Image: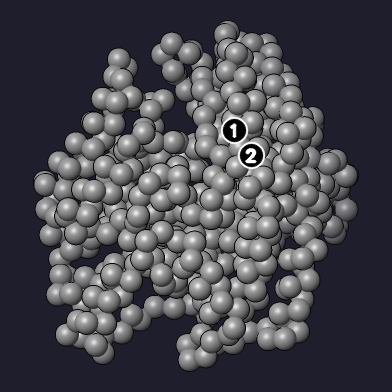
Amino acid sequence: SRRGDAASERRDGPQWNAERHLIQPWPYAGSIGNEARTPIGSGDGIYITDGEGRRLIDGPAGMWCVNVGHRREELARVMYEQAMTLSYNTPWYTMSDPSAELAERLAAHAPGDLDHVFFTTGGSSAVETALRFMQFYNNVRGRPEKKLILSRGGAYHGSTYLSASLNGRPRDRDWMDGADDLVVKLTSPDPFRRPAGMSVEAFCDFLVEEFRETVTRRGADRIGAFVGEPVQASGGVIVPPPGYLPRIREICRENDILYISDEVVTAFGRIGEVFASQDVFGIEPDMITFAKGVTSGYFPLGGVMISSRLTEVLRKSNHAAAMFGHGYTYSSHPIGCAVALKNLDLLEGGILEHARQVGPYFQERLKTLEDLPLVGEVRGAGLMACVECVADRESRNPLALDNDVGKRIDRHCHELGLLVRPLINMCVMSPPLTITREQVDDMVAILREGISRTMDELRAEGVWNG
Ligand code: PLP
């Protein structure tokens, strides 16, 4: 710990307390239980304020979640009012008005016959629910062998045991166990990292062929589900090749493999629509998982949209008494559902339209950063984007990973008034959807300066000479 630091010499305060008592997510063994992170005191609109009173653009909108922006009076009020009306009810054998109304509103937005919803506490629990539902569905259908799950490199689906077993980003699993016997991993649909000399079209064919070949080799009768983010978010905002998702969807349909579209990030306006699977990517999944933006992060809530076709199969099965033994104390939480209803009002009342307008401008302005020699590619969709840095643009060498270029850019940008989400050699951005064009300009100007300072620093240290 930073002993010389005045703040930590005080035997109280957030830094003192955190360094002794708080374990935050994703810590390293070497600093576990002894680490203070950047304190954030308050938020307003697209801005947050750090412990030193510096106002920062909230580049990642918290964790891709504060979609309608911070300090929304309407959301604060609805939480208060719901808590004063009904703070909690057991979903085991009662229900609340907000949960039933939200179910109806979400069903109206979801594609095709995804007319049912199971509410959870967040994204991991949503993915976990979808997977356990697939297992239950196949058990009831008399297909207990059909349980393998297909996932991909670059994926992030959560931090519960089964959802985390699907994760495919480098380093995530190095020191962690997983249910590896249940999961089959495929290639990330990352066009930037396609084999040298291969066209994007040929790369798409390769991915589809790999999928088809895996189904043949492992056997369709053993594969229960495919889980995929329409745009791999935490993997670096990887937008798949055009046509890839519909082709994968079709193979799943042909082989009775449930297609689970993980929209924990892409839903609720991040790409301009409430759900992106059909409206943006033209696919109708069997299940859609969501969380984050459903309450704009004001209350922990997630869920799974489930096709009526699946519920009907269960209802008409020979095992009417078979129980889906799954649920959370906070499933269908009345406060979460009330917040989500008001959040949906805000999205439908203009924010979705705004996101559709400003999204292309955000992408176009960020793309201008590609003239910086450290930047290999800027990519994205709607209001989610990634700046990927490379040592050499020809070979696309992602820099010696331990230079932690993302962290360096984040440090410089922080000084300049922007929080970015550093991911090894990448910076990921997903600001509140309310961001204006002028604020996009500010964000891009700060990023340009932050990346330029990082380039100077790397050159001065002799670790990069671009
Ligand atoms: N799925 C996706 C696509 C995510 O990005 C995340 C979190 O970032 C999750 C699932 C897990 O959600 P949570 O952290 O709410 O459990």
Residue 80, numbered circle: none
Residue 360, numbered circle: 1
Q: How many marks?
A: 2
Q: Which of 123 and 380 is in front in this view?
A: 380
Determine if residue 427 is in view.
no
**Residue sitting at x 29%, y 26%:** 201
Q: Is mark 1 on a helix, strand or loop?
A: helix
| Quarter of the rendering containing residue 102 | bottom right
Residue corresponding to mark 2: 357
Can you give x and y, in whole percent of width and height, for residue 25 in the image?
58, 54
The C terminus sits in image quarter: top right
Can you give x and y, in whole percent of width and height, for residue 5 in the image?
84, 42
Q: Looking at the picture, does residue 71 appear above or below residue 54? A: below
Colour theme = one colour
Q: Nearer the viewer, residue 159 or 231?
A: 231
The N terminus sits in image quarter: top right
Can you give x and y, in whole percent of width and height, for residue 364 in the image?
60, 26
